[in-house]
Structures are given as C-alpha cells and as structure tokens.
Amino acid sequence: MPASASKLAIHGGEPVVTISEPEQWRFDTEKAMVLIREIVEDGAISGTTGVYKEFEDRFREYVGAQYCVASDHGSSALASAFYAARIGPGDEFLHPVAGYLGSFAGALHMGARPVFCEVDPETLLMDPADAERRITPNTRVINPIHMGGNVCDMDAFIALGKKYGVVIVEDAAHAHGAEWDGKKIGNVGDVAGFSLQGRTPGGKPVAAGEGGVLCTNSREIYERQLIYCHLHRTGITDELTLPEYRMLEAQVLGYKWRAHPLALAIALVSLESLDYRIERSGEYREAVFDALRQLPGLQPEKTHEKAKRVSLYGGLKVVYDPEQYDGLPTTKFVEALRAEGAPISGIGFGHMMHTRSLFSRGFDLWGHGRGPLGKDFEPYKPGDFPITEDLHTRVINIPCYLEPKDGFREQFIAAFEKVSENHRELLES
Ligand SMILES: Cc1ncc(COP(=O)(O)O)c(C=O)c1O
C-alpha cells in the first residue's frame, strides 16, 4: 500500500517520516583545530595580518571582486557599506518588507529612513518594480536581500541604480557562492555584504561563529569602508590612496569592527567546502522542488533564469495555495505534515518589518524627537503591503540538506503527497 493511501498520522495513522536527524555531513573540526592551535601558539590572535589577510584574499579570489574587507559581523559590514554609499540624515533607502533589521541598522543610526517595499510573489525577493514606485528625491540606497541564497533580479536593480543615481547595497548574508549571469555575488553590483555568523552546516554558507565580509569593485567604496571601521588596520595609511582619505591618520574614523582572527581561521576551513555544499544542497533542493511541483497548490520559490542560487542558510520556501485544497488553511496543512514527521520549519517570512514596533510606532532614536523614526515619521500599519502580507500566511518553510540519510528525501516528499491526497479529511476535523 503506498504511504499516501494510509490514514493521516494526525488522525492516528502511521507517520511517513521515520528517519530523524537526517543530516550526515560534518564540518572538518580537526582541520580548524590545527589552524587555531597554530595561531594561538604564534600569539597572532589580534590584528589584520596573517590569517586575516589570508581570508580576505581567498574570499576576494573566490568571488572575483577587486576588494574585500572582513569585519566582526555581517551587520557591521553592511553598516560600512551604507557609510560608503554616503547615506546620512534625511536620506531614504529601500528595503524589502520581508527583510531584516541587521541588514540596515547601520543606516538607521546614520539617520536614514527605511522605505519598505513588496516582494515578488514568485521569487519571494524584493520586487524591483515596486521599489521603483517608492523612489523619491531622498532615496540614496536600494538594499535588496538575496534571502535564503536566492538571487534578486540584479539587472533590474543595477538599472535602477543607474537611472536614479542611487547605490545598490546588496545584502548577501545568505548568498556566498551564488551567481548572477555567471558572476559571483560580490562581483556584480556596487557592494555586497556577507555574514559569517553561525556554524557549518546550518549557519551562513561560510561560517565563523561571528564575522562579516564586504566585496566591491570600487576603490572609492573600499576606502570608505576601511576608514569607517578599520581603526589601526596594519598598513591602512598606505592602503588609502584617494586624497580625501589619505590625509587621515591610522585611527581613521575610530571604529574598530575587526573580525577575530580565530573566527576567520574557522571561516577559511568553511570556505574550502563551500562549492561541495552548494552542489549537494542544490541536488536536494531541485529533487524536492521537482516533486512538490507535481502536487496541486504547491509552488516552490522561483529562481531567476540568470541566477545560480545557493541554499545553505534559511531553508527553502514553498508557496501554498489554499484554494487548491478546498480552503484548507496553511496551518492545518502544516500540522498534518508535522504529524507525518516532516520537519517543517514554520510558516511565513522570518521578519515582517512593518509590524515591528520600531516601524509600526516609530522610535525617538536620538532623543529630543530627533532621528529617522522620530516626530515626522509616519508609522507603518498592517495592510500596507498586501502582496507580502498574503504570502506571509502561505509560505511553508522547509529545511535543505547536504547528505541526508538514505531514504529521508523520499519520506519527506511522501509526507507531502500523503497530506495533499488526503487533505479532505483535514477539512472535517
Ligand atoms: C539577511 C541578513 N542580513 C544581515 C545579517 C547580519 O549578519 P550578522 O548576524 O553577521 O550581523 C543577517 C544575519 O542573520 C541576515 O540574516
């Protein structure tokens, strides 16, 4: 009897997924430990030479960009990218409403105001057409996110950048190794910021515990990043070639947002396996997406034809259509999947920015009613983003694996098939 013909587990039947903890791939901890030991023995646990430089060089070569700067977090990398874009008080920047505060906190503190926009219902990424409608004379930056490693329409964003004279600050926190039109992200737009947060696997595609990296092909942007957050970087006064910055002393603008060398040692080991992990997770993703496309009302997130996405962080998204299931709500569909043992991560986008109190109420950021969310800020409200809000109730998040245990993938797909075929039983309960 096929699994789909048996009673739903939520109604007392046998669960389809019997394999737990499916991931078998393991990080090369020994290799990292050897490197860490060497660095600790050498006492090279501070500064920007040695392993620091090696990581920046390797990442830059991997991405193919001309310049690469490592920092202590993805959010500090992105903050220096906003600084490099010359954002300041009174400016606006565009960000997807299904976004992330850590992406743009730096810009907020510099006095700029976020203007949120809808996501595209097929890719679930920032919609360039909606972004364009929200551009004003105050717009200084567009801040798309390659969420979950899926790549935004970079042709469209680069065209907007040129048309309106704004800088594209890409949030590539999840997108190490992803490509647009044959080029790696980080070597496509004005500047891209990556996070190194978490562990491998499970954390960011290249993970260091905590850390960040910026890539750009612009000397001007690179030098502005350096002056913003690299106080006393070794050789910084020689690296600053543009007259405006050359006159600064080694203390530059005073922030020291360097990564820890031990973290970058871990990131170096993580980077070594990146291509392998991209390939394996891609095979898993495509097999699961192909199977789910055969079922009614389940639309995997689309990837732009010019993009090569990665799926090493944030899982995968499938858009559920209740109309194809006689009105069965997403929550009931997901409850039944979970009862079958399928590890469903959740429903909706991780962060709907406009309903966060910062943006639904405003906030006196600098005191005395000042700052970008102060007195003259018009708070957002539910209903402002109908497309993304609707998707938020219908997106099912599923995990992606590198080397799942034998039979897991088939069981996972079978759980969807079973719930799909037997959904009418759920309408009655
Ligand atoms: C989309 C996105 N942007 C930016 C960041 C910030 O990175 P970090 O945590 O390294 O500061 C994250 C981290 O989770 C993220 O998910």
Image (cartoon, rainbow, N blue to C red):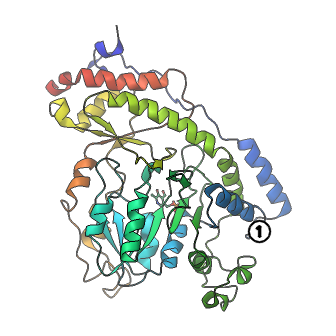
Which residue is at 43% across, 78% downward?
Answer: 109
Image quadrant where one finds the N terminus: top left
Q: Position of residue 151 (x, y in %)?
A: 44, 52
Position of the C terminus by quadrant: top left
Residue found at the very far right of the displayed protein: 42
Image spot of residue 268 (x, y percent):
69, 53
Between 380 and 302, the one nearer to me in the picture:
302
Residue labelled with disc 1: 49
Q: What crowding class fits label 1: few (fewer than 14 Cα within 10 Å), some (14-19), or many (20 or more)?
A: some
Above or below — where is 282 with respect to 254?
A: above
Q: Is residue 328 visible?
A: no
Which residue is at the far bottom?
247
Q: Quadrant of residue 118?
A: bottom left
Residue 169 horizontal/vertical position (percent): 46, 68
Q: Residue at x 54, y 44 (%)?
A: 202
x, y percent for residue 216 = 57, 68
Q: Left of 370 or right of it: where is 72? A: right
Identify which amino acid the numbered label 1 is placed on: Thr
Report whether 70 appears left or right of 36.
Answer: left
Residue pictured at 43% horizontal, 69% vertical? 104
Q: Nearer the viewer, residue 393 or 194?
A: 194
The residue at 62%/39% (across/down) is: 276
- Residue 256 appears anywhere in the view: yes
